[in-house]
Image: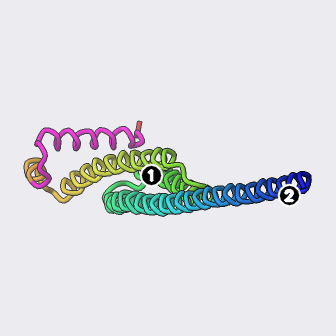
Amino acid sequence: MNYAMLVLGLIMLGGVLVFRNQTGRHATLAAEKRELNDLLDEARLVKSELEELLRETVKVSEQLVHQVETRLITPLVNDNQIGQTKDEREDAPELKRHEAMFREIKSNVKTTRKSTKQSRPNPNKVLRDSSNIISLAESMSAENRLLDRYGQIYHLAEQGWSIREIAQALNLGQGEVELVLELKKKQTMYNQPSNW
């Protein structure tokens, strides 16, 4: 009988160990499942944040393209109006330079658009490209405003306005108007073929 009790005790002990082992596995599996679900939730959150960042980058890129186009087209239209009063030979180099700058800006914009569509955006690169485009457009815009002002001076002088009238109309100093007209006169003298 002692043997029977001993065998029965061993069987019960084995059953308890097997039961304990099974419940331990279930607890481990449940913990791993919770951890996996947490990781999936975190991955979904990161994915949604990246999608939002991509949308914002595309939006910023489109705004920059609009700003650049606005800053370039208006001065170019003004430059074309100035060209009506200038000799075409004088305008050709400026126009070519402006067209080259415009092509460069368009190329930068296309590159920026491709990089945002093809890969995950790098905000630093987008900002660096954007500031390059904006600084180039601003320098072109300032240069065009200066050329526009000179063109207005030339145009009004050709219509017979006095230096004083031009200065008042354009809100400039008389000395500045006189200097611009004198430089224009000297430039045309040097560009004339000599009859000697």
Q: Position of residue 147 (x, y in %)?
A: 30, 49
* Secondary element at tag 1: helix
* Secondary element at tag 2: helix
Q: Position of residue 99 (x, y in %)?
A: 48, 54
Q: Position of residue 61 (x, y in %)?
A: 46, 58
The residue carrying mark 1 is 98
Q: Label 2: how many residues lie within 10 Å, few (<14), some (14-19) or many (20+)?
A: few
At 33% from the left and 40% from the top, the residue drawn is: 187
Q: Quadrant of residue 27?
A: bottom right
Q: Label 1: how many residues lie within 10 Å, few (<14), some (14-19) or many (20+)?
A: some
Q: Is residue 110 visible?
A: no
- Residue 153 located left or right of residue 38: left
Front residue of this view, candidates 168 and 62: 62
The tally of labels here is 2
Range of magenta residues: 169-195
- Residue 73 located left or right of residue 41: left
Residue 8 disc label: 2
Q: Is residue 32 visible?
A: yes
Q: Amino acid at mark 2?
A: Leu
Q: Quadrant of residue 159?
A: bottom left
When the figure is inspected, residue 7 is found, relative to residue 173, above or below; the finding is below
Color theme of the render: rainbow
Q: Amino acid at mark 1?
A: His
Q: Position of residue 156 (x, y in %)?
A: 19, 56
Distance of label 2 from label 1 (alpha carbons):
100 Å
Front residue of this view, candidates 41 and 171: 41
- Residue 50 located left or right of residue 35: left
